[in-house]
Amino acid sequence: MSEFAIFAGGVALVVGLIVGGGPALIVGIVVCALGVIEVTAREHFSGFRSHSTLLAAMPAVGVEVVLVAALGEPHQSSGRALLLLAVVPVFGAAFMLLRRRFQVARQARLARPPAP
């Protein structure tokens, strides 16, 4: 199902780019991102492949979007630095937690006996 969401999001994204932006572009980006997040989270939490960096970026981007929406876009470099001051710790903490969780899942995956 996720692969279908990625494909549908890609099609909507291309249509949005051809038309010149608008709702199709936004929907395409969102649907494609949701599909990618689902696949990467499934692989990560099952111990198959680590996607710590990509998954840790999601809450960091969310915090950045909320801050920019609430406070407005920073126009000076000092404002951008303050934005990074809020976003980098979120990314770092999420990365550490996700990396630790992957290592536990990977260990459990490797310790399981093979299926008959």
Image (cartoon, helix red, strand yellow):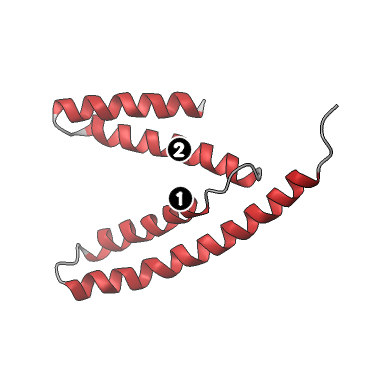
Q: Residues within 10 Å of mark 2 (few under 14, many from 20)?
A: some
Query: In the rendered image, which quarter is residue 100 located in?
Result: bottom right
Residue under label 2, please give it. Answer: 36
The mark nearer the N terminus, 2 or 1, is 2
Asked if 102 appears above or below 37 in the picture, the reply is below
For the residues labelled 2 and 1, the Cα–Cα distance comes to 10 Å
Residue under label 1, please give it. Answer: 54
Tell me the kind of residue under disc 1: Leu
Q: Are marks 2 and 1 in contact (CB under 8 Å)?
A: yes
Tell me the kind of residue under disc 2: Val
Where is residue 84? Give x, y as percent.
Answer: 32, 69
Asked if 74 appears above or below 10 in the picture, the reply is below
Residue at the image position 29 percent from the left and 26 percent from the top: 12
Residues 28 and 50: in front is 50
Residue at the image position 75 percent from the left and 45 percent from the top: 110
Residue at the image position 86 percent from the left and 26 percent from the top: 116
Residues 97 and 111: in front is 111
Q: Residues within 10 Å of mark 1 (few under 14, many from 20)?
A: some
Query: In the structure shown, which secondary structural element does the residue marked by tag 2 occupy?
Result: helix
Residues 54 and 31: in front is 54
Where is residue 6? Give x, y as percent.
Answer: 41, 29
Residue 21 lies left or right of residue 90; in this view the side is left
Where is residue 7? Give x, y as percent.
Answer: 39, 25
Residue 64 lies left or right of residue 74; in this view the side is right
Asked if 105 appears above or below 71 in the picture, the reply is above
Query: In the rendered image, which quarter is residue 16 located in?
Result: top left
